[in-house]
Structure formats: structure tokens, C-alpha cells
Image: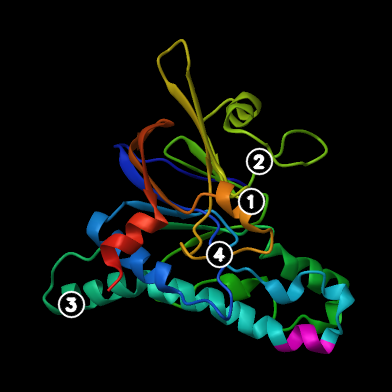
């Protein structure tokens, strides 16, 4: 089922691509993110998936089940720590606003689950005896006093004429679309995805004048992050956020904000 939420007037969307929170993370980029959100106050926040890295479930079949289950909790807590830091400034602001009967800030929060969160779904499908009230796909729901819409892996949300998913498939084989041009060609509407960790942008215009815009949104790792893939791959990944201004009927103005710029502005 597709979640569709369209407003009568243009809105700003903040796009947070794959950020892969892990237990040994320093989490500082989420502190910067929280400050950025309060400064800009977008009406819509879209988290594109893979906020939870779930590294303990990578090739888990090569490990003992007892090893895996001991570490799943740490992986889950890492994602919630990231989310707590991201929303801390908003929650603090709203607490003060309610105290003095001022208007609170309540963005529309779209949380998309990616293939890394789906590792838990696959693990539980293959080990159903381990599923419980405390270990199921609901563990990715927020622990904070905020309203969210959780979108399952491979499902999508359409917000103000833009389709969002962790990734969109290129055809019946289910492989992810590899370019922004292919994204708008295959989907015939404005669409944004994560997953790839690189950035690609494409656009076209309908005969009616309506914009069709495609965005593959990179990643949101720490500027000092070094991945398993090595420096050559790290050099082609892009780390940061995107702000879409005046989103309406699929059209918008696009601003990119690199993780390095956030660090320069907010790191103390």
C-alpha cells in the first residue's frame, strides 16, 4: 500500500539519505542534523532508509545464532540513539513552546526502511522461533514522542507529487535503478531514492509544464567515515543532506548540504 500525502500549498522537504548508524558510531552528524532541522524547520522530513546499519546480521549465517542475537540489540539501540540526537532540539523546543503556550514545531516525518533494516525481517523469517514481542520489525518504530509514518522496505510514499522509496526497481527482476535518468524514465513521475550512496540528478518537463525530477540522494556518513569498500569507493560516495524547496506537484528547487559543511558550521 502506498502512502500518499499531498498538501494544498508548496512545502519544503528535508531528505536524509542512508546514514548507517552503528554501535561504535560517534553520532555527531545527528547532532548537526538536529541543529540544522531547527534552523531550517522543513515541513516534511524524509529518511530514505538504512539509518539502522544492522551489521550483526550481515552474513549472519556464517556466525552462531547466539552471537547474532547478542548483538542485534546493540544495532537496534544505535539507530534509536541516532534518532534521539536528531530530534533532541525539536523536543526541547516543543517542551518550551508548550510551557509558554507558543506554537510547536511538528514536521511530517516519513521513515522509510531500507535493505539493512530488512536484514532483521529476513533473519526472523529464517528463525521464526526467535521472533518475540521485543524482537520484530516494530523495533524500528520511534521511541520518541513524535508522529511518524513508517514505510516498509520496497514500498513507497508519495508526498506532494514526489515518490520516495529506499530504491525503485528497474524491471521485473527487481534490481535497483542505477541512474536518475532511468529513475524518471521508468517511473514517469518525480522520484527520490537512496541505497546507492552516490548522487545523481535528472529532470524533464511534461508538455503541460509540470516538472519530473529524479534524485539519487547519496549517503549521510560522518565526513571522516572509512567504509569496508576502500578509499576508491569512499571517494565517489557523497555525504550530506538535500533540501527541496517549494515542493508541489512533483516540482521543486534543490539545495545540497554536504556533511563537511554541516561539520564546519556546527562542530564545536
Q: CA distance from mark 3 to mark 1?
A: 47 Å
Q: Quadrant of the C terminus?
A: bottom left
Which residue is depicted at the point 86% across and 80% down? Answer: 63
- Mark 4 or mark 3, earlier in chain: 4
Q: Are marks 3 and 2 in contact (CB under 8 Å)?
A: no
Which residue is depicted at the point 80% across and 72% down? Answer: 123
Residue 30 spot, x, y in % from top left: 41, 69
- Mark 3 or mark 2, earlier in chain: 3
Which of the labelled discs sits on residue 51, or is there none? 4
Q: CA distance from mark 4 to mark 3?
A: 28 Å
Q: Residues within 10 Å of mark 1 (few under 14, many from 20)?
A: few
Q: Is residue 106 at all visible to an observer of this figure?
A: no
Mark 2, secondary structure of its residue: loop
Which of the labelled discs sits on residue 168, or is there none? 2
Q: For mark 1, what is the residue?
A: 232
Magenta stretch, main secondary structure, is helix
Q: Residues within 10 Å of mark 4 (few under 14, many from 20)?
A: many
28, above or below 106, in the image? below
Mark 3 or 2: in front is: 2
Q: Are marks 4 and 3 in contact (CB under 8 Å)?
A: no
- Mark 1 or mark 2, earlier in chain: 2
Q: For mark 3, what is the residue?
A: 96
Q: CA distance from mark 1 to mark 2?
A: 26 Å
Mark 1, secondary structure of its residue: helix
Mark 4 or 2: in front is: 4
Q: CA distance from mark 4 to mark 2?
A: 18 Å
Q: CA distance from mark 3 to mark 2?
A: 41 Å
Q: Residues within 10 Å of mark 3 (few under 14, many from 20)?
A: few
Residue 171 spot, x, y in % from top left: 77, 33
- What segment is highlighted magenta in the picture? 66-70
Q: Are marks 4 and 2 in contact (CB under 8 Å)?
A: no
Amino acid at each position: 500500500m502506498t502512502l500518499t500525502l499531498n498538501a494544498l500549498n508548496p512545502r519544503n522537504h528535508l531528505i536524509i539519505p542512508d546514514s548507517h548508524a552503528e554501535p561504535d558510531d560517534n553520532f555527531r552528524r545527528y547532532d548537526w542534523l538536529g541543529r540544522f532541522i531547527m534552523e531550517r524547520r522543513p515541513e516534511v522530513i524524509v529518511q530514505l532508509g538504512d539509518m539502522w546499519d544492522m551489521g550483526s546480521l550481515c552474513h549472519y549465517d556464517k556466525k552462531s545464532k547466539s552471537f547474532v542475537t547478542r548483538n542485534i540489540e546493540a544495532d537496534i539501540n544505535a539507530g534509536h540513539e541516532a534518532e534521539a540526537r536528531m530530534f533532541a532540539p525539536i523536543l526541547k523546543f516543543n517542551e518550551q513552546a508548550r510551557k509558554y503556550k507558543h506554537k510547536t514545531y511538528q514536521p511530517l516525518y516519513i521513515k522509510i526502511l531500507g535493505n539493512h533494516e530488512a536484514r532483521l525481517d529476513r533473519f526472523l523469517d529464517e528463525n521464526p522461533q526467535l521472533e518475540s514481542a521485543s524482537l520484530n520489525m516494530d523495533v524500528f518504530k520511534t521511541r520518541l514522542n513524535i508522529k511518524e509514518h513508517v514505510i516498509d522496505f520496497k514500498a513507497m510514499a508519495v508526498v506532494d507529487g514526489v515518490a520516495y522509496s529506499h530504491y525503485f526497481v528497474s524491471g521485473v527482476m527487481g534490481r535497483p535503478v542505477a541512474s536518475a535518468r532511468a529513475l524518471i524514465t521508468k517511473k514517469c513521475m518525480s522520484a527520490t531514492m537512496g541505497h546507492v550512496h552516490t548522487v545523481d540528478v535528472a529532470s524533464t518537463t511534461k508538455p503541460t509544464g509540470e516538472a519530473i525530477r529524479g534524485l539519487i540522494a547519496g549517503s549521510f556518513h560522518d565526513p571522516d567515515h572509512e567504509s569496508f569498500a576502500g578509499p576508491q569507493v569512499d571517494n565517489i560516495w557523497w555525504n550530506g543532506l538535500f533540501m527541496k524547496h517549494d515542493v508541489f506537484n512533483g516540482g521543486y528547487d534543490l539545495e545540497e548540504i554536504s556533511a563537511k559543511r554541516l561539520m564546519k558550521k556546527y562542530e564545536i
